[in-house]
Amino acid sequence: MTPSASLEQSNRFTHFCDLIAHNVSCERDDRILFENLSLTVQKGDLIQLVGPNGAGKTTLLRLMAGLNQDFQGEVHWHGENIQRCYQDYARQRLYIGHLSAIKKVLTPLENLRWFVSSWPEVKEADLWQALADVTLAGYEDVPCQQLSAGQQRRVALARLLVTPTPLWILDEPFTALDKEGVAWLEDQLARHVAAGGTVLITSHHALSDIPALRYIELGMHK
Amino acid sequence: MSLVTATIKRDLVIAARNPGEWLNPLMFFLMVLALFPLAVDPDPNFLAKIAAGVVWVAALLSTLLSLDSLFKADVEDGTLEQWLASGESLYAMALGKAFTHWCISGLPLTIVAPLLALMMNLPENAYSALFFSLLLGTPILSLLGAVGAALTAGVRSGGLLLSLVILPLYTPILIFGASAVYHAGIEMEYLGQLGFLASFLCMAMTLTPFAVAGALKLNLSR
Amino acid sequence: MWEALKRLYHRMGSPKWFYEISTRWLPWFAIPAGLCLIVGTVWGLAFAPADYQQGNSFRIIYIHVPAALLAQSAFAMMAMAGAVFLIWRMKMAAWVAASIAPIGASFCFLALITGAIWGKPTWGTWWVWDARLTSMLLLLFLYFGVMALQQAMDTEDNSAKAGAILSLVGLVNIPIIKYSVDWWNTLHQPATLTLTEKPAMATEMLIPLLIMIAGFYLLFATLVFLRTRNKILWHERKKSWVNKLIQTPAGRS
């Protein structure tokens, strides 16, 4: 895949604000997932959450993204509770869950257009370029149901190239990608943090040599 | 374009590519109507007497049929998650979804109903009442139905539960809608009933989106 | 005053506190409930005068009216408990709402059955689409919907929330349903005899009715207490205070 030129200049995101979890605890069906967990995410961080299945990685990711309000403790962005400044926060972070939100009867281009409709500054040409970058050139007008799972995943990941947000929160983004796709995504992550962006990610995939990488390990509580 | 309008547009495109989605309930409407003369009595005078009620009951049932899928696909493929992640108001989103549903169920029904009422030998002067009562009543069916659809979107066999939950709430609309048509047929004043339907519509438009928004969030907290 | 209310609220949220206080309160509800029901029944059946029009068959009113009243207010209570749960996320409120639902539905069913039985001598048929009976039937459907939702979702928390949302929507709708059914009824059957609308009830008939109503409400409170206590024990079964309670013989406190 060809690297995207727009991410070359460093420090694209000059005013990223810290995302801080203060003493968050979460319980599901009488089972404690984590307790009094504090986490600070700063500009240029690449943080990978690791741990066994059921350790609460996705839950932590979702509550950092502001999608889950069912927990104790607080998550702050810009020194303010994210639920209180949610609309500003939502514009600054991109969340891609393991459900890709792809509509199968629509084409990759139509899907992408829907994804970026909250960001009016994104231009149509950017969408075509992004699809070309994820090697889907020529597939722009093919309904997604005719694409493979990996190709559908790439449609979802094409958002990384077009959404102008400093914070990426990605839940298992490597699922269904082939070797080439994995390399491309790793490259994108490295570029994003090098450009001053921030990534919070869960993955069972071992990320290779990105200097900024930090691990947060979630264990199994009883 | 905001995410709400983008979603309305996208859902309408999906409906246009899957015509079964809105044609099948319409067919169902036609078939239910055909059952009454077969089961009860094909005598034109008798049909004229029950036409108002039968058309309204059939409209209500066919609306119910298309409600099940209103949020289900969005919950399952992660679209709902992306809505919440976008920071757009869920209230507006709920209104938008109900509007889309009305466009593909209530609106065609309102247009087709006078034609079918012809087969039921509806008295001549009741046609405008039928049209306007459906025009005012079917959006309420969509709005109230959206509450039920949102509540049951994550339930495995949600369709049956949806009917159980929503049908009692539909009774006032059925009563006033059918009575408007019936009264028009016997040359009595029916504007009062339409007035009631209009006020129910205003109420439903302001209140149901809160319930829909609340119910949709349930499908996200995992 | 405000502080005291706040303290009460926090205590109410604690299952342990509720369990302990309800242990003490229970007899104060259960015994008067029994007394009221016995006195009301005997008075109503044996001592109240017969109706000049309906004779003795009117006496079913002593069950029908309290049951119908209670079925409606129980729905409102359930919705309010649901609202408390939705707004302040107080788990106790969810358990109370879940306890109320089947009890309210049972009273609703009782009102329908007694209405039908009453209908036989009055109208000569078991079921007439009378306004009150019809809205009672719709209320029963609403109860069924809430109860179905309270068990439908994958987590207990979500089920409770779904039930709470539906009961709130239902609460807003009940007056509308009642009004439209009444309106519909006057349209179609202008001259039927309604069950409970008496021009003026004689005092000798009214007093046992009021006693029965009080008895039904007390019985309802007792049943809700019992069911909620069961739910508390189940949900807190891993907590030490429950274990201690179970180990002391017969759970004496």
Image (cartoon, coloured by chain):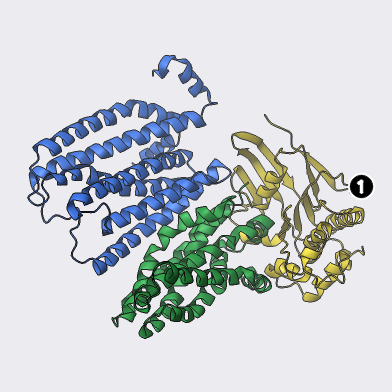
Chain colours: A yellow, B green, C blue
The amino acid type found where label 1 is placed reads Asp
Tell me what residue is drawn at x 36 percent, y 26 percent.
C23
Whole-percent x and y of residue C250? 41, 17
Indicate left or right for A83 with C189 as reference.
Answer: right
Outermost residue, top direction? C249
Indicate left or right for A173 with C71 as reference.
Answer: right
In this view, C137 is above or below C190: above
Tell me what residue is drawn at x 78 percent, y 54 percent.
A198
Whole-percent x and y of residue B92? 55, 67
Whole-percent x and y of residue C67? 27, 44
In this view, C221 is above or below C128: above
Q: Look at the image and tell me in which quarter the N terminus of chain A lies.
A: bottom right
Q: Which residue is mark 1?
A: A209
**Viewer-proximal residue, B79 or C204?**
C204
Tell me what residue is drawn at x 57 percent, y 62 percent.
B90
**Viewer-proximal residue, C49 or A84?**
C49
